[in-house]
Amino acid sequence: MSALSVFIIFFLCLIIAIPISIGLGIVSVLPGIFDSSFTASGQFVIRSMLGGIDSFPLLAVPMFVLSGMVMAKGGISKKIFDVFVYFIGKFTAGMPCAVIVTCLFYGAISGSAPATVAAVGSMTIPILIKLGYDKKFATAIVAVSGGLGVIIPPSIPFIMYGMASGQSVSDLFIAGILPGISIGLLLMVYAVFYCRKHGEDKEKIRKEVQALRDKGLLTVLKDSFFALLSPVIILGCIYTGVASPTEAAVISVFYSVFVSLFVYKSIHVKDLWGVMIEGIHTYAPILFILAASVAFSRVLTLMQVPQTVSEWILGTFHNGIVILLVINVFLLLVGMVMDTTPAILILTPILMPIAVGVGMNPIHFGVMMVVNLAIGFVTPPIGVNLFVASSLTQIPVVDIAKKAMPLILCFLVALLLITFIPQISLALL
């Protein structure tokens, strides 16, 4: 059975709405069924699935998911937002920029783009609308900024890439800092342009900022101290060598529970059971996709698909810049139709050797790959962030996507800079 047939069947499964995990399982066993001499039998596929999820680094994923949910329930995002509103709220586009920076900080807690959109959006979108901002613009800014949640460390996709490529997850986290900040700055530049063009209700904004300023800086910082400290603790444990990313994820869960229960008292012990059930509902589908993705990637390796694709690209395109542009376009298209986890686990063994072949650092490639797939969070037809944002405001996904296009262009500009200026990713290593 040819690799082309396998991919055609897989995309047919996607088109007829078969769950990705089941579709991956189907195409993983088909080569062994049609060719009895092929190494990947049904037993091999099952062993690969079980072996793929038997991973210590992978334990960080459910922990960061749970931590993000506890902090969302505990209102951590509102505390972070208040600090940035206090300092930059009075400037042009200060409120949208405060939303973007809040997404950056919350991304450093949850490691998940949809979680960032849900936690920050549920709190900030009503505020922006109350202050007179266009509802579609407010929703779009949160949906796109939420994509920073997978670039700013800790990042679940970076953990997946590290697992698929064998690269250091800690190095990937460090490499994601400057790209995440760069994208955030570009989004803020557009927010300023938009607000200058369409205007703002300065009187309402002034009242909102003044209400915070009347509390005083010390009071605002005191209220937000433990919320702002959470990413410092999580990342500090990793970068100082006190804890591995997985151990830091567990620390983040205990910290978020402690702060929410005893400091802010925003949740009760009885609420934790519901949060854990919600966390299981969120992570279980990811786990099945992950297991099936690992099996499928191993089947593709046995079929020598990575070598074939690598030889074709390197044989067809001879310029390193063109090769990187081709990879970017391919990843953007994949990000539009496939979830991040299977995309990373399937494509990393195929594309990383090509990138390394044209002189790209594997860590740099990982950042480029995750930024590409982050754009997929806000582009139809999959666009998970768009669906999460739509559920918050009841605005049709297509309308949010249209309003988000200029912001997506900012993301694309950042992608090109990250691709061709390696030091944006590697300067801190």
Image: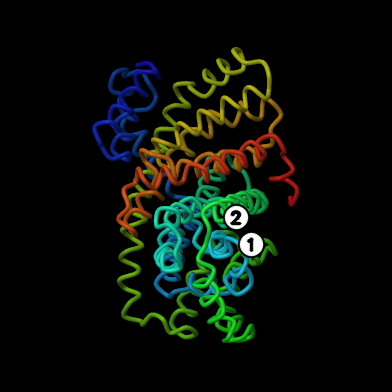
Pointers 2 and 1 in contact (C-beta within 8 Å): no
Query: Mark 1 — residue?
Result: 238
> Which residue is depicted at the point 43% across and 62% down?
121
Give the image quarter of residue 217: bottom right
Eyeballing the image, is 336 above or below 178? Answer: above
Three-letter code for the amino acid on which mark 1 is drawn: Ile
The local secondary structure at tag 2 comes to helix
What colour scheme has been applied to the protein in the rendered image? rainbow
Eyeballing the image, is 213 above or below 63? Answer: below
The local secondary structure at tag 1 comes to helix
Q: Nearer the viewer, residue 111 or 54?
A: 111
Q: Nearer the viewer, residue 41 or 153?
A: 153
Residue depth check, mark 2 versus mark 1: number of the one nearer the observer? 2
From the viewer's perspective, tell me whether residue 148 is left or right of residue 2.
right
Three-letter code for the amino acid on which mark 2 is drawn: Val
Q: Position of residue 242 (x, y in %)?
A: 65, 67
> Which residue is depicted at the point 52% across and 20% down?
309
From the viewer's perspective, tell me whether residue 407 is left or right of residue 318.
left
Eyeballing the image, is 305 above or below 134? Answer: above
In the picture, the disc for residue 42 is: none
> Which residue is depicted at the point 43% across and 84% down?
265
Q: Position of residue 88 (x, y in %)?
A: 62, 68
Residue 248 visible, this angle = no
Q: Position of residue 51 (x, y in %)?
A: 42, 44
Q: Position of residue 413 (x, y in %)?
A: 61, 39
Query: Mark 2 — residue?
Result: 192
Give the image quarter of residue 391: bottom left
